[in-house]
Every structure is written in structure tokens, then in C-alpha cells.
Amino acid sequence: MDTFQVIILALIQGLTEFLPISSSAHLILPAQILGWQDQGLSFDIAVNTGSLLAVIIYFRKEVWQLLTAWLTSVFKQKHSADSKLAWWIILATIPAVGFALLFKDYVETVFRSIEVIAATTIIFGLLLWRADKLTHKDLTEYQTGWKKALIIGIAQALAMIPGTSRSGVTITAGLVLGLSRQAAARFSFLMAIPVGFGAAVFQAKDFAETSHAIDWHALILGTSVSFISAYVCIHYFLKLISRMGMTPFVIYRLVLGAVLCGVIWLG
């Protein structure tokens, strides 16, 4: 890849990882529509690492509180609101891990098509609109509870299907279950940390088994651009949804889905 493609793909990853519009779909589309060469596993690891570091650093205070509270609950048997939230996040991670282990190869071969992306972009966009407009939402992430956390975790497992959007489907589930917009987004972003770390480990394992040459310039640039764009995205997304809700993202998904349907029809 040349420098322009690296920057564009890294921006796509950073900007769409935490917006409810599907980063995986947007990373697949340049190859599908523009004929760009697939970015490869090493680049995927780099940009995913950049966005993972962004969410960890942005929520560094919350991450430290949750981690220390969780360790206290494990070793001293002392529980708090933070330790409960940490356990709920761990519980919500389990369905995605199980789904990945069972269906990873199938999803990566069967569902990585423009037809699937078009359908999931529209369907899950409409579900997000339904959840945002027609549900009562006032719970904080500390009022999630283990049952709601598990349901959100099951929703997160669906995000392996391109076009679904991990943040989109988990925020949708959180809204349906009564979480406020910001609480649903924060819970979704915190859930991204263990899932992102696990995905990086699996990707690194697969990469270690290959013998491809490494373009360090592309990896460093991609990681940096992904980190900066993801950090900025998280900051402004949390501010935007308190004022405008999910409508702008729903409209974007519907327009994108319509464009994709047009590409399918013409092609």
C-alpha cells in the first residue's frame, strides 16, 4: 500500500471503530469498490492496536478504577460498584469469545461480501433508530446488572458479521435495556477493551504463523493515525449523542446501505 491508502484506511478504522456504523464494513469496502489491494493481517493488527490504545487512554481513569476494584473483589472479597461493573464487562465479553472461536473462519469467508454489508448496514441501522426513539432510557452503566450485561454481550457477538457494527449493536442493546445514550456508549467502549485485546492476541498468533514481509512504515503510520482519529472520535461522539441522539448515524447507515445496493444492482 502507498502512504495515501495507509492514511485513508487508518482514518476509517479510527473514526468508525467507535461510531455505530461498522469499521469492518468500511475497511472491506475499498477493496470491494475501489479495487484496492487487501491491507493484510499485519495492517489490521496495527490499526486495531491504535484504536484499542485510544479507548484505554481516553478512559484511563475508569479503567484503573475498574481494574483495582476487580482485583480487590478477587483477592480481598470486597465488592463495590466498580468491581460489579468490571465483572459485568467480563461477563459481556464471553459470548463474543465463544462466537469467535466457533464461527471465525465461517464469518470471514461467507459473510465478507458487499451484499451482506448492505443488508446489515440497513437492518441494524433501523434497529438503532427504533431503540433510540422508542425506548425509555435513564439507567447508568452502574445499573446494568449481570442479565443486561449478558444480553449486551450476546449482541456484541453479532458484530463479527461485517456491517453490523460492534459499537452500534451493543449501544442498540443497551438502549433497549434502558441505559441512557451516554451510559450505553460508555459500556460499549469499555467492553471494547477486553474484546480488542483478545482479538489482537488471536491476530498476532495468526500473523506469527505467516512469513510475509513487514512494512514497518505502514504499520507505524497506520497505528498513529488510527490512535489519533479514534481518540478524537470517542471524545466528540459522547458529546454529540447527548444533544442529537443516534439519528445522524442512522441516516448515514441508510444512505450507505442504499449506495451499496446501487453498486450491487449496477455491478
Image (spheres, rainbow, N blue to C red):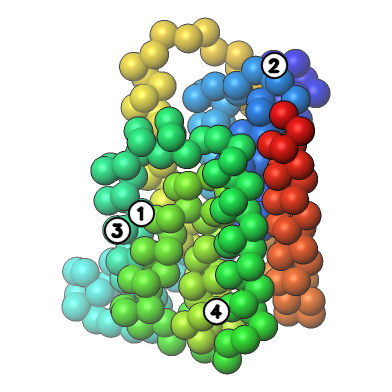
Give the Cα separation between the discs numbered 2 and 1. Answer: 31 Å
Give the Cα separation between the discs numbered 4 and 3. Answer: 21 Å
> Quick one: quadrant of the N terminus?
top right
**Left or right of 201 on screen, residue 29:** right
**Considering only order in the chain, which callout, 3 or 4, is on the residue closer to the N terminus?**
3
Q: Residue at x 73, y 76 (%)?
A: 245
Nearer to us in this view, 210 or 75:
210
Q: Quick check: 230 above or below 246?
A: above
**Left or right of 92 on screen, residue 3:** right
Is any part of residue 204 visible from this angle? yes
Image x and y of residue 110, in percent: 43, 35
Q: What element does badge 1 sit on?
A: helix
Q: Residue at x 48, y 47 (%)?
A: 161
The label shown at residue 175 is 4
Q: What amino acid is at disc 4?
A: Leu
The label shown at residue 94 is 3
Q: What amino acid is at disc 2?
A: Met
**Considering only order in the chain, which callout, 1 or 2, is on the residue closer to the N terminus?**
2
